[in-house]
Amino acid sequence: MERQFTVYSLLGLLLAFAIAIVLTAIVKLIGRKKINLLLMILIGAISFMISLGIAFGIYVGSYNHADVSANKYLESTSDVEVNKIDSGYYFNGKGNKDAIIFYPGAKVEATAYAPLLFELAKSGVDTFLIEMPCNLAFFGKNKASDIIDEYKYDNYYLMGHSLGGAMGATYVASNTDKFKGLILLASYSTKEIPDSINVLSIYGSNDGVLNMEHYKENKSNLPSSTIEYVIDGGNHSGFANYVTQSDDHLASITYSLQQELTKNKILEFID
């Protein structure tokens, strides 16, 4: 994700130069012999904003779509009632004590995580799948508040994948009184999480996206009681149903198995 953002940033700068040149040429063509400093600054500012908008549009527009296999988990069954809500989706199972609020990874369609969240609800832990603006949790890190204000559970856990986990951890760090636990999937916290919050950290041994250097550097932000679980053969993309990210490593297990192992570890953690 960091490499992609760098590429699009460079593209934005190139577009800024190109637009500035074009606008300057247009001004000259309409008869202005001299372009004063104020006009040049205005041209530069306009071209820069336009190029940033184009680059950002390209960046967020090329997101990872959910696999069609995830669609069946958006339909209610006798075990789980699936409801479309303002914040995303509510998977209402037979449990009424514990609930997980989930933040998706960057540029991943939220519904790709439906299989994992459906199975958790089926096993007794209700889940909320949050749809983020532009598929980036950076723009919706406080969305958990909407759920907590409207629904009443004894224990709330915030879970997030990749960027979703990092943004979720930031929210939990500022709202420790609202949560019993934090669950990180291929992610880490840049903010200190107090000992009062139970933490579970899960990632795959074949993860090619998670920056392990940053992961290790930020371990000190988590409580000493944090449980770390490495899924042998799992990768970064396997927590949801979507095509493996281009910069990820291939998994040696199916995403179904990776999600099953993840679900079991989460249930064990909550119990």
Image (cartoon, rainbow, N blue to C red):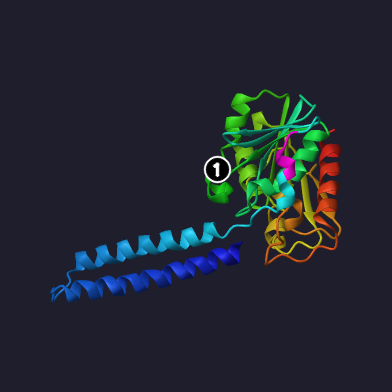
Question: Residue at the location (60% across, 43% down)?
Answer: 131
Q: Which residue is mark 1?
A: 140
x and y, in percent, of residue 214 in the image: 67, 59
User: Which quadrant of the structure image shows residue 83?
Assistant: top right
Q: Is residue 35 magenta?
A: no
Task: Say above or below: 239 vs 34.
Answer: above
SS class, disc 1: loop
Q: Pick whichever, 86 or 192, lies toward us.
A: 86
Q: Pick whichever, 89 or 233, lies toward us.
A: 89
User: Which quadrant of the structure image shows residue 47?
Assistant: bottom left
Segment colored magenta: 72-76
Question: Residue at the location (24% across, 76% down)?
Answer: 25
Question: Residue at the location (55% across, 48% down)?
Answer: 138
x and y, in percent, of residue 253 in the image: 85, 59
> Viewed as shown, does residue 167 lie left or right of 267?
left
Whether residue 110 can be seen here:
yes
Whether residue 240 can be seen here:
no
- Quadrant containing the C terminus is top right
Q: Pick whichever, 208 or 72, lies toward us.
A: 72
